[in-house]
């Protein structure tokens, strides 16, 4: 547990700072996280678990990244956490997504757009289910330029919090 705390959890606190402050997760934070996770897996003879966790996290988060939902730093952070947590990255991902969804809904509530968006989503689901209309669910698109929408959640923060929760449990 001490190795996970020193090699993974403490360094990941700097991810929280940079993601909140600059909305970036730097490579100089994620690459050592991945490499030390692989090194620890080699030392503890759990390399297959670490590689499977990293591969799972990379694929899932890469799909989200290709859909323009998250950035590259989040993908690399999840891959590094997968090296440390192995198959437990499933729990880290699940808890992180739940925390991120709550945070995002709170942001929408603060902006006053939660109710109209929920109404649009539920209406679209109703039309899709009852009438079978394809394309009935219309959600707002992310901006094409590099601007960050005000309701966006810096996803590295919930992911690191979830890693702490899973490690403590």
Image (cartoon, helix red, strand yellow):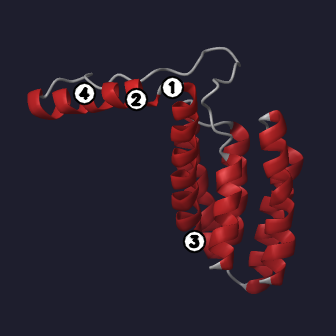
Q: Is the residue 16 above or below the residue 65 in the image? A: below
- Quadrant position of residue 39: bottom right
Observer-side mark, 4 or 1, equals 1
Separation of residues labelled 4 and 2 (CA atoms): 12 Å
Separation of residues labelled 3 and 4 (CA atoms): 36 Å
User: Residue 108's x, y, as percent?
Assistant: 53, 32
Q: Is the residue 12 above or below the residue 69 in the image? A: below
Task: Point out which mark residue 115 bears.
Answer: 2
CB under 8 Å between discs 4 and 2: no
Q: Secondary structure at mark 4?
A: helix
Q: Earlier in the sequence, mark 3 or mark 1?
A: 3
Observer-side mark, 3 or 1, equals 1
Task: Point out which mark residue 123 bears.
Answer: 4
Task: Please state if 141 lies on the left or on the right of 27 as rendered.
Answer: left
Task: Point out which mark residue 142 bears.
Answer: none
Question: Are there few (<14), some (14-19), or many (20+) residues within 10 Å of tag 2?
Answer: few
Label 1: which residue?
A: 112
CB under 8 Å between discs 3 and 4: no
Question: Are there few (<14), some (14-19), or many (20+) residues within 10 Å of tag 1?
Answer: few
Task: Please state if 73 lies on the left or on the right of 151 as rendered.
Answer: right
- Asked if residue 82 shows in the view, the reply is no
Task: Please state if 33 lies on the left or on the right of 80 as rendered.
Answer: right
- Asked if residue 141 shows in the view, the reply is yes
Observer-side mark, 2 or 3, equals 2
- Residue drawn 52% across and 47% down? 102
Separation of residues labelled 2 and 1 (CA atoms): 7 Å
Given residues 154 and 90, the one toward you in this image is 154
Q: Earlier in the sequence, mark 4 or mark 2?
A: 2
Q: Secondary structure at mark 1?
A: loop
Q: Looking at the image, which residue sits at the far top?
A: 145
CB under 8 Å between discs 2 and 1: yes
Observer-side mark, 4 or 2, equals 2
């Amino acid at each position: 547990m001490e190795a996970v705390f020193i090699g993974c959890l403490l360094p990941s606190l700097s991810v929280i700072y940079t993601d909140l402050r600059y909305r970036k997760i730097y490579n100089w934070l994620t690459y050592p996280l991945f490499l030390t996770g692989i090194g620890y897996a080699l030392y503890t003879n759990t390399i297959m678990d670490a590689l499977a966790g990293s591969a799972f996290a990379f694929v899932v988060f890469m799909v989200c990244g290709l859909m323009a939902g998250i950035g590259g730093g989040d993908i690399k952070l999840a891959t590094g956490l997968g090296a440390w947590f192995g198959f437990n990255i499933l729990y880290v991902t699940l808890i992180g997504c739940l925390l991120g969804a709550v945070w995002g809904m709170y942001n929408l509530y603060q902006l006053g757009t939660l109710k109209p968006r929920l109404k649009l989503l539920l209406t679209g689901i109703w039309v899709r289910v009852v009438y079978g209309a394809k394309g009935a669910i219309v959600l707002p698109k992310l901006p094409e330029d590099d601007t960050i929408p005000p309701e966006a959640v810096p996803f590295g923060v919930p992911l690191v919090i979830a890693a702490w929760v899973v490690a403590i449990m």
